Amino acid sequence: MINAAPGTGAISVAGISEVTSGSSGNQLVFDYAPTGTMDGGELILTVPSGWTAPQVTAAGTAGYTTAASTDKILRGSVGTLTVIDQVVTIPITSLASGQSIRVRYGSGSGSSGAVAQGITGYANFEFSTKGKSDDTAASIGRGTVYVTNASDGSGSAAITPASISAGSTQDIDIVFTAAGNMDERREKKRQNKKKT
């Protein structure tokens, strides 16, 4: 039986498709469906820069990444995941057409979740495949997640000094720390809405 060619199959976003910039505890879920048998092949995920580096050894630590077959009856199977920088390699032990592999980046969310990039816009999680281990990897596409501005009411303010005497004259410093990106264009849109 001949395995599917490199760069074939389809990737889809199976979980959330929008997160807040700079937010933590994010779990992103992607499904890969092959066009044919993938026994001995590989699925490769490249996490974009600005996101938590993926890791596959410590559940409960940010960036924890897992992969498993979604088929509960005729299960495909994967080997031990490996990571170099932002790249996760998922060896496929057995996978047939009609089965799929689910990849969880930030698996379990919470402390295992990933911290999103600090800028707004589209974040592209690139995927490629090898039909067999000695193939040259080829792109199959990307799972795209949209990163929004920091949510309303987020961030923190520090006031110095914490207290002053009644009737005294003293400078007060207020330092605001944003929880994520706060694009000025969003504020302008809000002002325009209020005027109309």
Image (cartoon, rainbow, N blue to C red):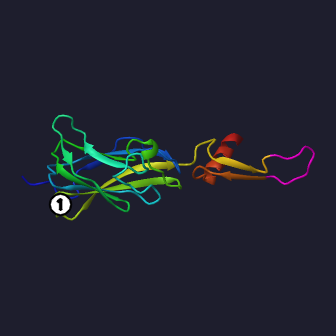
Q: Secondary structure at mark 1?
A: loop
Q: Is 165 one of the magenta-colored residues?
A: yes
The residue lying furthest to the left in this view is 1
Q: Quadrant of the C terminus?
A: top right
Magenta segment main secondary structure: loop
The residue lying furthest to the right in this view is 167
Viewer-closest of 166 and 1: 166
- The residue that label 1 is drawn on is 133
- In the rendered image, is residue 99 in sight? yes
Task: Give the number of marks.
Answer: 1
In the rendered view, does 108 fall on the left or right side of 120? left
The x and y percentages for residue 128 are 27, 57
Residue drawn at (65%, 48%), measured in percent from left and top? 187
Viewer-closest of 20 and 108: 108
Residue drawn at (9%, 54%), measured in percent from left and top? 2
Task: Specify the segment rendered in magenta.
Answer: 163-172
